Image (cartoon, rainbow, N blue to C red):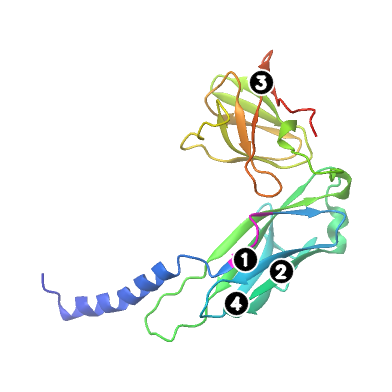
Amino acid sequence: MKMSVLQKGILGMLLPATLLCGESAMAAISLDRTRVVFPGNEKSVSLSIANVSSQKPYLAQAWLEDAKGNKVNSPLVVTPPLQRLEPLKKSVVRVSVTDAISGLPTDRESLFYFSLREIPPRSEQPNVMQLALQSKIKLFYRPAGIIPEKYSRLDNLLVLHPAANGYKVENPSPYYMTILGITGSPKSSIPKGFKAVMIEPKSSKFIQSEVYPEPYLTTIDDFGGKPVLGFPCRNGVCRAALHDEQ
């Protein structure tokens, strides 16, 4: 099939952009974690970032959003908000408290989102589309009064109430809980189409699921791990087998 001069010109402009998009699919600026737990007995936490590109410097732009997605500079603030990373170099982004931290609840966690965007150097080639990739992770501010004396799993505090087509999951704890899946055994795969559910502290949500004699929950712990725990059911209530274990 022959192409007109106009078609050839359009293809010539689109091809470089398409190729660059494919090359840029992997982020150049990487973050050292998938979630942040900010202990209330600390004034700041540091996140490590790195430029994994061996050839180009990148700008790293960082900011915080509240639970509704609004950018905020209080009661937590990010520094520096913008910095340059040379190829294969590492740096640090710090999240610090402001005086307004006293306005947050002291009996439960507060949710924020930490965002990190990479800004590539200007391309020397004409008609090239460049992508600014962005990472967004949850940041939980955990007041000093609810920090465990020693780390222990927190998902065993959940309580499940079976229903016709799922479970009402009660979270009586002061912590945010994220449920990645509900299965009938510890080694079963999470059903396709199951959407992760985050339950706020001291609240409950109904989760659609197959109902099992003993449901197993896959959750996310403080370190980004995905533990699985069984919840034996008695008299219409399912509680964790390790409910009293620390």
Q: What residue occupies the far top of the structure in this picture?
A: 235
Q: Nearer the viewer, residue 242 or 121?
A: 242
Residue 232 badge: 3
Graded by Cα atoms within 10 Å as few (under 14), some (14 to 19) or many (20 or more), the crowding at tag 2 reads many
Three-letter amino acid code at the position of disc 1: Leu
Three-letter amino acid code at the position of disc 2: Val
Residue pointed to by mark 1: 116
Element class at badge 2:
strand
Query: Is 32 a magenta residue?
Result: yes
Residue 93 badge: 2
Q: Which mark is first along the chain, 4 or 2?
A: 4
Tell me the mark number nearer the camera, choosing from 2 and 1: 2
Image quadrant for the N terminus?
Answer: bottom left
Three-letter amino acid code at the position of disc 3: Pro
Residue 59 badge: 4
Q: Note whether residue 120 is visible.
A: yes
Q: Which mark is first along the chain, 3 or 1?
A: 1
Q: Are marks 2 and 1 in contact (CB under 8 Å)?
A: yes
